[in-house]
Image: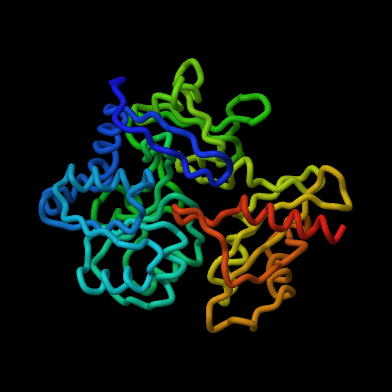
Amino acid sequence: MNDLCELSFTGGATGLPKGVMITHFNRYANLVHGLGWLLEPLSRGIIGKSSVYITIPLFHSYGHALVHMAAYWSLRVIIAPDPRDIENIVNTIKEHRPFLIPTIPTQLMKIEKYKIGRVNSLFFSGSAPLPESVREAVMKDMGNPIGEGYGLTETAPVATLNPSAFSKITGFMSKEKRGLGVPVPDTDFRVVDTATGEDVPFGETGEIIIRGPQVMKGYWPDASGLTQDGWFHTGDLGYMDNEGFFYVTDRIKDMINVSGLKVYSTKVDDVIFRHQGVQMVVTIGVPDPEREGSERVVAIVRTKEEFSGKVSADEIINLCREKLAPYEVPKIVVFKNDLPMTVTGKLWKKELREEFKEILGKKA
């Protein structure tokens, strides 16, 4: 249970990468609680007979775990040579029609424009929140649901799965429900006040902390990073509804402080994604040169090719005014053709923050 299986490294999107000590027990628990739990009713038709298309880099904890899960269920493995080559990914889907296609949101944002059409494949999204508009567009095109889950390198990596997404074929639930799902078996979740550490009520936002058989031994080299009784503080803000489903609203480091009021960047992103011309968006907070201790909300938008030069900042701001509180509306909207991404395919907010801090600093 304590022997080290691997030393995985965090992505470093919000700081220096950390070495995560994953034991053989952590890894095996994830195998049993991943595909082994989510798709168990279909296991006789899947084990040794189906395929999984891994479009995630294998050095990412998500992609690495998928290789183990595929071996565990004797699945044929198709690997994308370049996870950023969306055209190749689309052509492979059309040619091989893999049963399971795990992806990340930035890939689905680009896949959507290709209009693949009906395929008998199950898509799964992880590593970052999936915007509702992107989910709906892909589902409308391909006719199948998109599963979601939540996890971190420190949880080897699966912590929650949404069993309702595939409920029509697994029978787990009577209807589909959005969200990141419920904790996988044997896993405890709490949502706590970031200041007091006390549990918050249903529906209220706090930090998600996790304890379970898949939670790391600790950070290399001294097994730090866990409380004395085994809880891991994720640094993610979220809430649980009264049916036990979890939702992530933001990273603590990404939350924007506007004169003491909290703005969740993912909430602003979701609204901006509703504009038909938006392919990608990143909302960040940068220091407000006119108010010490406060931040300005900045939205950086990449439009779809056919909308290039046809979407204005005023359109985006007016859309936000309709759906958001005044303090949540971006003060600045910038259009960029190239948005920086980490090597694991996440939009790199840290780099964008540094860039816009410098720009605003010069203007001030």
In the picture as drawn, the residue positioned furthest to the top comes out as 228
Scheme of image coloration: rainbow
In the image, taking residue 169 as reference, residue 116 lies left or right, namely right
Query: Where's the C terminus, which quadrant?
Result: bottom right
Can residue 161 be seen in the rendering of this structure? no
Q: Closest to the observer: 33 or 351?
A: 351
Residue 17: horizontal and vertical position, in percent? 50, 39
Position of 98 compared to 225: left or right?
left
Quadrant in the picture for the N terminus: top left
Query: Relative to 186, does residue 323 appear above or below in the rendering?
Result: below
Q: Is residue 210 above or below residue 64?
A: above
Left or right, 308 with respect to 101, comes to right
Which residue appears at 21% of the width and 48% of the height? 70
Where residue 51 sits in the image (x, y, percent)?
19, 58
119 or 336: which is nearer to us?
A: 336
Residue at 37% x, 78% y is: 115
Q: Position of residue 53 (x, y in %)?
A: 26, 59
Q: Nearer the viewer, residue 176 or 16?
A: 16
Q: Is residue 244 left or right of residue 43?
A: right
Q: Residue at x 76, y 56 (%)?
A: 358
Is residue 74 visible in the rendered structure shown here?
Answer: yes
Q: Looking at the image, which residue is at 64% across and 56% down?
A: 352
Q: Whole-percent x and y of residue 216? A: 39, 28
* 351 relative to 339, above or below: above
Q: What number of labels is visible?
A: 0
